[in-house]
Image: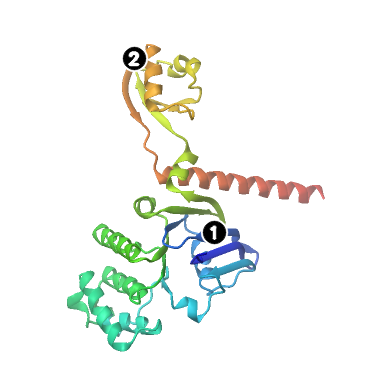
Amino acid sequence: MSVHPLEMRSVTKRFGFFTAVRDLSLTVPQGSIVGFLGPNGAGKSTSLRMSLGVLSPDEGQVRLFGGAPDIDTLKRVGFLPEERGLYKKMSPRAIISYFARLKGMSASDSRKRADELLEVMGLGNFGRSRISKLSKGMAQKVQILSALAHRPDFLILDEPFSGLDPVNQQGLEDMIIEEHKRGATILFSTHVMEHAERLCDSIVMMARGRKVFDGTLDQAFGALGRAALIGVEDGYDLNAAISPKGFTENELAGDHWRVSLPAQYDAQDALRAAIEAGAPITSFRPEEARLRDVFVSLVSEAEAEDLEKTLATRKATEAA
């Protein structure tokens, strides 16, 4: 039976009266790429720090490769923190080599690995320059290379795309794919949905310190619901025309109708129903599900539930 790189069981973390993470359970399977998504302040970074033992949970349990985070298990992990920090007077080559040696590589192997990575990321000519002389984007790449220099079994990247231009973001995506092909398990946090759409096997969404979704991309899109977008001539009531045909949840959205699709129908069925009803159709297209839409929907629902709980607690307190 394989041991998961990371398991968090009913984990809660408080800072004073503020609950940063509440009752979080998640599993990162071996060999997967998992996106950890949420807005700023959702509890992502706090959760990742608990996964490494940097912070201890107030409740619940964290298991890294089957046990509590310790020196041995942490050697199998590469971590990119959200708060970047490099030794300004050191060179990229020396920094990458230094972090690789901390994880158990020999001095000669770590230097060879540093040279290899710097060439891959287009920094070969800057290997012996001071970090203070590099641009912000170049320094960011050095930090990323430091996290994966020792070929970790498990990569944890906290907002890895932050500070990179589109070209370098694509380069980092390619590197994540290569690390995954090598066999690494990868967990990365981001608030940019497009990266998760392109890279992830599954996603975990956080809002206000709690998990609001945990599943595959297909399951995430299914949570939003499917729809067809049908434009008609001004004033035509498409809802009245197609409701009798089984399409009962329709709303006017700007210059088109959004027709929600029941489980047994697809977009072509909605179009056929509109044609049969004699609708004066001006445009048609299936709605393309985007992770951003799923995220906004789930986060809003979570915030609404939190508000209801707050109001209920307040009423109970006032009644007492």
Please name the residue that numbered disc 1 is placed on: 26
- Nearest the camera: 229 or 89? 229
Q: Position of residue 44 (x, y in %)?
A: 50, 61
> What is the number of the mark on residue 285?
none
Please name the residue that numbered disc 2 is placed on: 280
Rendering colour mode = rainbow
Around disc 2, counting alpha carbons within 10 Å, would you say few (fewer than 14), some (14 to 19), or many (20 or more)? some
Up-down relation of residue 204 to residue 139 (above or below): above
Around disc 1, counting alpha carbons within 10 Å, would you say few (fewer than 14), some (14 to 19), or many (20 or more)? some
The three-letter code of the residue at mark 2 reads Pro
Disc 2 to disc 1: CB gap under 8 Å:
no
Q: How many numbered marks, from 0 up?
A: 2
- Nearest the camera: 320 or 286? 286
Residue shown at 33% from the left, 25% from the top: 284
Q: Position of residue 167 (x, y in %)?
A: 24, 59
Query: SS for tag 1?
Result: strand
Up-down relation of residue 9 to residue 240 (above or below): below
Query: SS for tag 2?
Result: loop
* 138 lies left or right of 212: left
Q: Position of residue 253 (x, y in %)?
A: 41, 28
Regarding residue 166, the answer to whether it shows in the image is yes
- Nearest the camera: 53 or 33? 33
- Nearest the camera: 49 or 271? 271
Residue shown at 39% from the left, 28% from the top: 228
Regarding residue 20, the answer to whether it shows in the image is no
Up-down relation of residue 54 to residue 298 (above or below): below
Up-down relation of residue 17 to residue 72 (above or below): above
Q: Residue furthest front?
A: 1
Residue shown at 51% from the left, 66% from the top: 3
Label whose residue precedes the other's in the sequence (2 or 1): 1
The three-letter code of the residue at mark 1 reads Leu
The CA distance from mark 2 to mark 1 is: 49 Å
